[in-house]
Image (cartoon, helix red, strand yellow):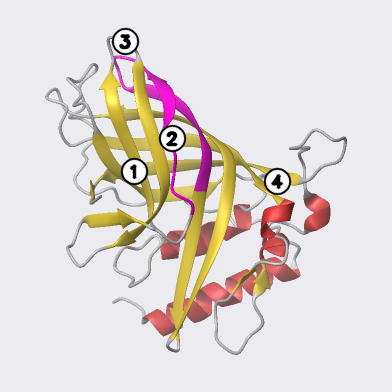
């Protein structure tokens, strides 16, 4: 039996409040995986006849243990549920796939559900994602670094809609797209991500979960301003959080 949205929002907010109170750290073990639809794991070809392009959507995302943001994994798993009215949607376009040349173009960013099940659009309220050149092998191993990926959490509760944008800079993707011999039914399982959240870009930004309560500071959810662990602008002082995470993705339709 599914819990009501209101009850689940309460549980998520309670978890985030505990996270903030503990300075963003948690010892909770989190399962990063979710069901990925009909993929069976045994039907993937070693070197598929890939199509020139695919539209994909994250269906799992989890920060690695020891990285800032690890304690957000349980809330993230909940908000990735596409049955919600306002789920977290991260879209990835793979374009100009050419395994002979070993090249492709990758674009990723925040999306929104449409009124048609399984179709999504880019979120126009955030910076438009740029395509980045990447490399791809015949077996589907690919790498690319996106200049920016905007991660958007939208929470509806009590009639209020609150949107929080988390910009992730220099997002490096190291993953493998798998498909059957004809290049159909593509999936990405256990891909790796690494990137940077700049203190200056989330300082003063809060995440509202329950109307009437003070927003939770994003800086606290990453461990507090004093926990920044990377000198992004190379001025001798740490000013960003270096993040690492795993993700999985399934095929979808992006409507331009």
Q: Which residue is mark 4?
A: 241
Disc nearer the start of the sequence (3/2): 3
Disc 1 crowd rating (10 Å Cα; few below 14, some 14-19, many 20+) is: many
Q: Is residue 156 visible?
A: yes
Question: Is 89 drawn above or below residue 163 in the view shown?
Answer: above
Mark 1 and mark 4: Cα distance apart in space: 24 Å
Q: Residue furthest right?
A: 236
Disc 2 crowd rating (10 Å Cα; few below 14, some 14-19, many 20+) is: many
Q: Nearer the viewer, residue 199 or 19?
A: 199
Which residue appears at 43% of the width and 84% of the height? 6
Q: Which residue is mark 2?
A: 191
Q: Is residue 146 magenta?
A: yes
Which residue appears at 40% of the width and 58% of the height? 124
Question: Is 239 drawn above or below residue 192 in the view shown?
Answer: below
- Are the residues flagged by discs 1 and 2 in contact, CB closer than 8 Å? yes
Mark 3 and mark 1: Cα distance apart in space: 24 Å
Q: Position of residue 174 (x, y in %)?
A: 47, 28
State the SS at label 2: strand
Which residue appears at 62% of the width and 45% of the height? 65
Disc nearer the start of the sequence (1/2): 2
Q: What's the magenta region? A: 127-149
State the SS at label 1: strand
Q: Which residue is mark 1?
A: 249
Between tags 3 and 2, which lies in front? Answer: 3
Q: Is residue 32 visible?
A: no
Which residue appears at 43% of the width and 65% of the height? 78
Left or right: residue 169 compared with residue 61: right
Between tags 4 and 2, which lies in front? Answer: 4
Disc 4 crowd rating (10 Å Cα; few below 14, some 14-19, many 20+) is: many
Mark 4 and mark 2: Cα distance apart in space: 20 Å
Left or right: residue 229 compared with residue 193: right
Q: Which residue is mark 3?
A: 101
């Amino acid at each position: 039996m599914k819990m009501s949205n209101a009850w689940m929002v309460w549980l998520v907010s309670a978890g985030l409040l505990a996270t903030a109170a503990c300075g963003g750290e948690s010892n909770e073990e989190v399962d990063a995986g979710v069901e990925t639809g009909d993929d069976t794991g045994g039907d993937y070809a070693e070197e598929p006849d890939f199509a020139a392009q695919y539209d994909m959507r994250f269906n799992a995302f989890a920060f690695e243990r020891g990285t800032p943001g690890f304690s957000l994994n349980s809330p993230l798993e909940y908000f990735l549920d596409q049955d919600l009215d306002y789920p977290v949607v991260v879209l990835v376009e793979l374009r100009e796939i050419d395994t002979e040349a070993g090249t492709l173009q990758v674009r990723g960013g925040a999306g929104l559900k449409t009124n048609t099940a399984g179709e999504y659009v880019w979120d126009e309220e955030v910076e438009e994602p740029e395509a980045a050149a990447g490399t791809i092998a015949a077996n589907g191993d690919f790498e690319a670094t996106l200049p920016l990926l905007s991660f958007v959490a939208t929470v509806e509760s009590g009639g209020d809609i609150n949107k929080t944008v988390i910009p992730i800079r220099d997002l490096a993707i190291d993953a493998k797209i798998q498909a059957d011999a004809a290049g159909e039914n593509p999936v990405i399982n256990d891909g790796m991500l690494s990137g940077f959240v700049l203190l200056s870009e989330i300082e003063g930004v809060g995440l509202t979960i329950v109307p009437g309560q003070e927003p939770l500071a994003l800086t606290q959810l990453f461990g507090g301003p004093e926990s920044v662990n990377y000198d992004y602008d190379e001025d001798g002082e740490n000013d960003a959080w270096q993040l690492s995470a795993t993700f999985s993705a399934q095929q979808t339709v992006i409507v331009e």
